[in-house]
Amino acid sequence: MFEVVETLQSPADESLNVWFEPWAEGVTLPPGTTVELRATAPKEGRLEIEHQQNGAVVYGWPGSTLQVFAGGEVAWSSCSPCPELPAGMDLREFTSFMFGPPPTQSAVAGETAVKRPWWKFWGQGHTE
């Protein structure tokens, strides 16, 4: 089993919205929070982290699963492995092609590092 560990930190004075692809889910990290991103897969790969104006997008690789640890506890965990991709496409290209850009630009700020349904990143919309 192959494992990659990265850390991600929100700014000291503001929240950071983090979106996980291809799982189409995210969390909001409170100001000054550091999380550990732990990805595992049967084959080698790496996490790609794309920083944006109001957040970050974390991309897995085919076969990978992801867990996010905050304060030593699991704050988020993928429910299934990242799927195989069409030949010649990486995950960033594939998700942008299929679904458009990740919604971190218009994310709802101020929530704690908990799992949120995708529609809450667009502000108004469905309710639970």
Image (cartoon, rainbow, N blue to C red):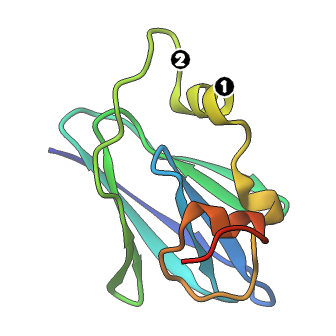
- Closer to us: 91 or 38: 91
Q: CA distance from mark 2 to mark 1?
A: 10 Å
Q: Position of residue 6 (x, y in %)?
A: 45, 61
Q: Residue at x 78, y 71 (%)?
A: 124
- In the image, taking residue 40 as reference, residue 49 lies left or right, namely right
Tell me the crowding category of disc 1: few under 14, some 14 to 19, or many 20 or more residues within 10 angstroms, Cα based. few
Residue underneath mark 2: 89
Q: Residue at x 75, y 88 (%)?
A: 12
- Closer to us: 121 or 67: 121
Query: Which quadrant of the figure has residue 44?
Result: top left
Q: Of the numbered discs in the image, which one, if any, rests on residue 15?
A: none
Q: Nearer the viewer, mark 2 or mark 1?
A: 1
Q: Amino acid at mark 2?
A: Met
Q: Position of residue 63 (x, y in %)?
A: 28, 36
The answer to whether the residue labelled 2 contacts the one labelled 1, judged by CB atoms less than 8 Å apart, is: yes
Q: Residue at x 67, y 78 (%)?
A: 10
Find numbered disc 2 in the image and state the secondary structure of the residue it sits on.
Answer: loop
Q: Amino acid at mark 1?
A: Phe
Residue underneath mark 1: 97
Quadrant of the rendering where the C terminus is positioned? bottom right
Q: Position of residue 104 (x, y in %)?
A: 73, 60
- In the image, taking residue 125 as reference, residue 98 lies left or right, namely left
Find numbered disc 1 in the image and state the secondary structure of the residue it sits on.
Answer: helix
Which comes before the other along the chain, label 2 or label 1? 2
Q: Position of residue 99 (x, y in %)?
A: 65, 36
Quadrant of the rendering where the N terminus is positioned? top left
Task: Please tell me whether residue 59 is drawn above or below residue 55 in the rendered image.
Answer: above
